[in-house]
Image: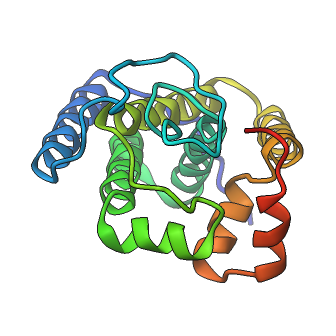
Amino acid sequence: MTGIVRTPLRITRPAIYAALALAAGFAITLVLMDRPPICTCGTIKLWHGAVHSSENSQHLADWYTFSHIIHGFLFYAAAHFWLKGDTRRWAFPAAILVEGAWEVLENSPIIINRYREATIALGYSGDSIVNSMADIGWMSFGFWLATRLPARVIIGIAIAFELMTLLLIRDNLTLNVLMLVWPIDAIKVWQGGAWLT
């Protein structure tokens, strides 16, 4: 019995159009949710590195950008292994759909309050629309990278991102998910001692 050989996923032009339409729909949804278009500080920064700040998750990139790139890696891997035949060409819009749905959920009161209660994001009030759209863009970049680089390289980049953010801000995608789903007081206390602000 021979194994199934899967060709690499490619991002086609129709998939890009569908992805753009979905992203526009999520932007409109966030507007209807009364999310601020940009940081209430009145500026748009390329990078904002202070985690314990009212400007966190308000600009184009921050320490959590690395998690969104990893989302793209994970969505690519899921599509590569689970989608078959013609459905594979819609993997990229499917990734946009999942990421965009998370951005909407993340900016809902239930998740905002959960972040405040269970994680180190004590003053978290949700993302600006610019940040949410940038997060979708960073996920797209991760998905695109996964279409271009060998799996071992992508895995290495993901591990490096997780270790780097763990070291520098005491948080990463793994801890973020863990603390949302099953908060551990000892981790919360340890994260609260992060030296990078």
> Residue 119, how many percent across, how many down?
63, 68
Q: Quadrant of residue 154?
A: top right
The quarter of the picture where the C terminus appears is top right
Residue 163 in percent (x, y) is at 87, 45
The answer to which quarter of the image holds residue 89 is top left
Lateral position of residue 81 relative to residue 190, left or right: left
Q: Position of residue 36 (x, y in %)?
A: 24, 39
**Which of the pair 33/162 is nearer the observer?**
33
Number of labels in the image equals 0
Q: Residue at x 68, y 80 (%)?
A: 183
Residue 61 seen anywhere in this rendered image of the structure: yes
- Colour scheme in use: rainbow
Asked whether residue 3 is in view, the answer is no
Q: Percent from the top left, x then y, of residue 1?
A: 74, 66
Residue placed at 84% from the left, 78% from the top?
Answer: 186
Residue 103 is left or right of residue 187, and the answer is left
Considering depth in this image, is 196 or 145 the residue closer to the camera? 196
Image point (35%, 33%), residue name = 133
Viewer-nearest residue: 47 or 80 = 47
Q: Is residue 189 above or below residue 169?
A: below
